[in-house]
Amino acid sequence: MAKREKLYEVAGDRQFRRQLRKLDNEVEDLKDFHTDLAELVLKQALIRVPVKSGTLRDTIRASGTKSKAVVRAGFAKV
């Protein structure tokens, strides 16, 4: 399988999280931050996705965890 190229990379995100953990072990706020970040990327993905029937576009979704922002597209059948 070919290795996918990273489209976006946030510099210093790992260090940022490490410093926040030192300040406070409660990193639940990062989940909200990462969700908001993923939603920003989602908006741009919806603009750029090629559309024939809209099936792929309709499967794009965003989520955030304590450690990362995730934008996914497609399911097994798409």
Image: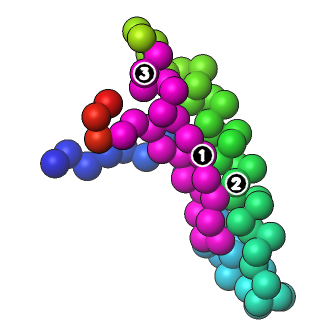
Q: Earlier in the sequence, mark 2 or mark 3?
A: 2
Can you give x and y, in whole percent of width and height, for residue 76 in the image?
29, 41
Q: How is the image coloured?
A: rainbow
**Residue at the (69%, 58%) spot, across then down:** 34
2 or 3: mark nearer the eye: 3
Going by the picture, which residue comes out furthest to the front? 77
* Dot 2 alpha-carbon crowd within 10 angstroms: few under 14, some 14 to 19, many 20 or more: many
Can you give x and y, in whole percent of width and height, for residue 65 in the image?
62, 66
Please report contact status of discs 3 and 1: CB closer than 8 Å, yes or no: no
Q: CA distance from mark 3 to mark 1?
A: 16 Å
Closest to the observer, 51 or 8: 51
Can you give x and y, in whole percent of width and height, for residue 30 in the image?
74, 68
Label of residue 62 in the image:
1
Q: Secondary structure at mark 3?
A: loop
Q: Secondary structure at mark 2?
A: helix
Label of residue 71 in the image:
none
Examine the image and state in which quarter residue 18 appears. bottom right
Up-down relation of residue 69 to residue 74 (above or below): below
- The type of residue carrying mark 3 is Thr
Bounds of the magenta segment:
54-75
Would you name the residue on which mark 2 appears? Answer: 35
Would you name the residue on which mark 3 appears? Answer: 55
Q: Earlier in the sequence, mark 1 or mark 2?
A: 2
Q: CA distance from mark 2 to mark 3?
A: 23 Å
Up-down relation of residue 9 to residue 77 (above or below): below
- Residue 44: within the magenta? no
Q: CA distance from mark 1 to mark 2?
A: 7 Å
Please report contact status of discs 1 and 2: CB closer than 8 Å, yes or no: yes
